[in-house]
Amino acid sequence: MRTLLSLAGPLLMLGLLLGGCDSVGLDDAGPCPSCATDSEPSGDPTGPDGGNDGTGDDGADGDSNDGSTGGSDDDSGGEADDGSGPGGSTDDFIPVDPRQTYTLTWKDDAIDAPAVRLADYGVAPGDVVCGQAVGDFYTEPGVLASSRGYPQMTAIFSSDASLLPSDQRVRVKGAVDTADDVPTLATAIDGLDTDVAEDFDATSGCVTVPDGARYVFLAPYDAYYGDNTDAHPSGQPFGLLLKK
């Protein structure tokens, strides 16, 4: 018996050590000291380490890389490439009725060429402007102007918008000379001279706007205008594509 009692104490202590915290009941004050340390989490989610894992480097870096900074880089690149910046289009189209002219006409149902104000197209004296006749017109039924081998369009600068009556050879009162002269055709009826010194070939090419010029008159190149018709009424109309 004494031997059994002497062994009871050590066995009891061994059982407590092996049982750990599983045997703690509602009446116990708390877990045993040996288990309190094991039951704590390895990291506190609200502490410094946990904060870095949840909302620290990964979150902040992700927002800054994918958000406003990255977006602003992409947006600025797009703005530089659109047509509103340097290198955007500066072309203007000036329509020309195939029946209009600033030259003398005779027994012809031509119409007066309107004065085109240069300032409306951002053009001023001293500017170099380039033009290209676009579209086409019939000089008579079945005959395209572009098929004749002649210029398709002529022009004359002027200091004012005045255009004198069609029976006068010099009709543009304020004509300002520039570039090379282009000889215009004599009238189809009676062969009257229509040529003036200040007009030039506007079919294709560049010209420097002379001092004093505020307007320009345009005309298709022909000897009789009343029967002219636009070759592409539902497509590209006849006119001047102005490049500045």
Image (cartoon, rainbow, N blue to C red):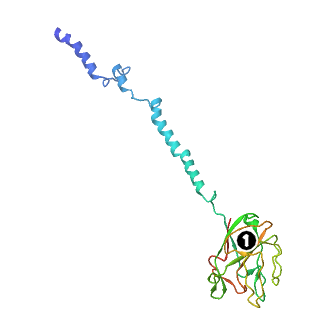
Residue in the image at 75% along x and 80% along y: 101
In the current view of this chain or complex, which residue is farthest to the top?
2
Residue in the image at 69% along x and 77% along y: 153
In the current view of this chain or complex, which residue is farthest to the front?
180
Q: Is residue 142 left or right of residue 187?
A: left
| Front residue (pair 32, 179) | 179
Placement of 33 over or under 210, stated as above or below: above
Answer yes or no: is residue 207 visible. yes
Look at the numbered disc 1 and give the secondary structure of its residue.
Answer: loop
Q: Picture coordinates of residue 192 (x, y %)?
A: 78, 87
Answer yes or no: is residue 1 visible. no
Q: Badge 1 local density, few (<14 within 10 Å), some, or many (20+)?
A: some
| Residue underneath mark 1 | 179
Quarter holding residue 30: top left
Q: How many marks?
A: 1
In which quadrant is the N terminus drawn? Answer: top left
Residue in the image at 58% along x and 51% along y: 76
Quarter holding residue 34: top left
Residue in the image at 51% along x and 39% along y: 60
- Label 1 sits on what residue type? Ala
Q: Picture coordinates of residue 148 (x, y %)?
A: 64, 84
Q: Is residue 238 left or right of residue 109?
A: left
